[in-house]
Amino acid sequence: MFNSIRPNSLEELLEIIDNGDYYIFAGGTDLFIRKRQWQGAERKFDKDVVFISHLEELRGIFEDRNYYRLKTCVTQDEVANSTLLPDYLRVPYGLMGNPAIRNTATVGGNIVNAAKVADSLPLFYALDASIVLKNIQVDRVMSIKDFIFGRYKTDRYENEIIYEVIIPKEDFSGFRYKKIGSRKSSILSKLSVFIVYKKAHGKIVDIRVSVGAVNDVPIRSEEGEKEFVKDNDIDKFLLTIREMMEGEDDRRSTKLYREEISLRIIKKFLVEIMEE
């Protein structure tokens, strides 16, 4: 058995987690999967749970001159339907899970769970997003790339929550996104490719390419992107990405399938972007 706590404010939440070890429960869509028992329906929680999705201090989508800011308990559906956010965020979020999942799953939960197949991570890697981590004493700001260092492995301390996600505003010319899964409904990614880019006078001046669900963390080569802007050599860029791939076979697909299909998608998208 476990106990559950429903704090009345952010301050109360931070005091609670500063004085004990809890599962922090927002949407629960990732946590329930992580804690399932294969022999039965009961979920195995081995410590107490603190609920946070009802706290208004942890909800809302905001913007200022330089950044978009997503509070941790914003749902995937709220991102997909936001009038503040650009299409390169809204469209991929609208393809995550299914309507029931999107109405429950949260922005912060998908990050802190740090699953290999987390659909938001390739976006945030490409967009150079950061997070604010908050505890009762101090705040920490760090890039999501530094926060996640392996499958289900993050730099979160036990007395911290992700408070918000900070995304730099950029005047991108366009984006490409493709996710491959076994089903059209409730897709768990076999792989995903996310690209944003800027063009000026017909030439690419900035491009970000991120690949999800192949390695334990998203693949992105910033040096490779800079070289591609200079020489537009697609094959050279694909070789750079291939050399970073270190996936493994699992129940959804093979390592070879993920790698080959990812590279084909990237090549197709790069050709399209160059011909625009």
Image: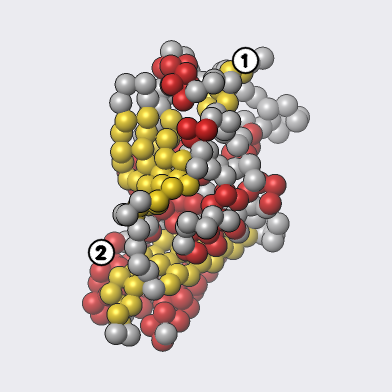
Residue 194: x, y in percent? 46, 64
Q: Is residue 151 left or right of residue 135?
A: right
Q: Quickly name the residue at label 2.
A: 223
Q: Is residue 222 left or right of residue 14?
A: left
Badge 2 density bin: few <14, some 14–19, many ≥20, Cα 10 Å:
few
**Could you say which disc has been placed on residue 196 in the image?**
none
Q: Is residue 129 left or right of residue 58?
A: left
Residue 33: x, y in percent? 63, 37
Residue 4: x, y in percent? 61, 18
* Amino acid type, label 1: Asn
Q: Is residue 233 above or below residue 261?
A: below
Q: Quadrant of residue 206?
A: bottom left
Residue 255: x, y in percent? 52, 59
Q: Is residue 274 above or below residue 189?
A: below
* Amino acid type, label 2: Glu
Q: CA distance from mark 1 to mark 2?
A: 49 Å
The residue lying toward the viewer, choosing from 242 and 199, is 199
Residue located 66% across and 32% down the image? 36
Q: Quickly name the residue at label 1.
A: 3
Q: Are marks 1 and 2 in contact (CB under 8 Å)?
A: no
Q: Nearer the viewer, mark 1 or mark 2?
A: 1
Q: Secondary structure at mark 1?
A: loop
Residue located 54% across and 66% down the image? 178
The residue lying toward the viewer, choosing from 72 and 125, is 72
Residue located 52% across and 49% down the image? 118
The residue lying toward the viewer, choosing from 205 and 184, is 205
